Image: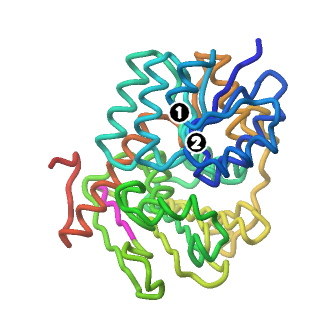
Amino acid sequence: MTHRIGILGLHHDHVWGNVDELSRIRNAKIVAAADTNQPLLDQFSEKYPDAKTYDSHEALLENEELTAVYVFGSNKLSEDLTIAACERGLHCLVEKPMAATLAGADKMLAAAEANNVRLVINWPFTWWSQLRHAIELASNGDIGQLWQVKYRAAHQGPVELGCSSHFCDWLYDAELNGAGALMDYCCYGAALSQVLLGSPNSVTGIKLNTGLKPDLTLEDNAILVMNYNNAIATTEASWTQIGKITSYTTAIYGSEGTFLVEPNHDGKLIKATLEDPEGSEVPVPEQSADLESASSHFIHLIENLDASVFPLCEMKICRDAQEILEAGLKAADKKQNVTLPVTD
């Protein structure tokens, strides 16, 4: 069977790499793409001349026979697009974070459950084999009782990184993004902590506008602290960091050891123990083909409806990660702890 895939939204820059991966999967066909920006549609047509383009998301859904959709709009628009696709019985791959708001994530989850379709959230760091292996080992007790999880995502800023104007326009809009750097980058650590530690009791949040980007009114840096009975987690975001040192660093601490994943330095998984305090590389076993990329995993999941979603991409876990973000935003605004579940 060939799975017919529609692309809803081209104004999230991550779309291009994911669609390129999809184009190499033999039993998937890129049918059409929709966006309201004509230059992006033209760019898509140049790369995929056999696919149709639409300047209306609704028209694509109305006119094309599809198996599934990729949703790569702003965080806010993606909420609506996902719900519309689910209500048509289409499986959905949605770029991280799940939504702009917790309310939006709840509606997406409800729509997927009501229509019995896959809703898979793509976190780019999921496809680092060394991180997946660290999650598996830590979850199975390899380093004992987990007591801290740390993740940092940082670069000089979306504009400085070379992101398109279509991408930056909504990243710098609090309503369309959900926040600034906090939503864009603290989301990763929220999802990772949810997988490894579950839902926290409360969240503390700090967001900062350094003034280094005079035209930016949102926060360019943020830190969330997740409090558990016997553990703590932190997730950091920066749009002002110079250089790659400490960027995208994962540390997982247990009673019997520590894992470090630092992709900017050879992408190795390092484990330290009492007997090996400096740490040594942990071999990463060969991974199954369905975990090579978001596209390979998604196609595998819609072909095998009983197969398990990798935890980072599982919709209920991602909904709970969204709740952490919501609590962090409230905490940062109120300058106080916010307990979970989040209420108005």
Quadrant assignment for the N terminus: top right
**As drawn, is 262 to the left or to the right of 238?**
right
For residue 88, above or below residue 334 = above
* Residue at image mark 2: 35
Instruction: Indicate yes or no whether the magenta region holds residue 226.
Output: yes
Can residue 54 be spotted in the picture? yes
Q: Residue at x 63, y 35 (%)?
A: 7
Q: Position of residue 112 (x, y in %)?
A: 43, 24
- Point out the tag, 2 or 1, that comes first from the N-terminus: 2
The amino acid sitting under disc 1 is His
Q: CA distance from mark 2 to mark 1?
A: 7 Å
The amino acid sitting under disc 2 is Asp
- Badge 1 marks a residue whose secondary structure is helix
Q: Which mark identifies residue 57?
A: 1
Q: Position of residue 115 (x, y in %)?
A: 43, 16
Instruction: Indicate yes or no whether the magenta region holds residue 71.
Output: no
Residue range highlighted in magenta: 223-228
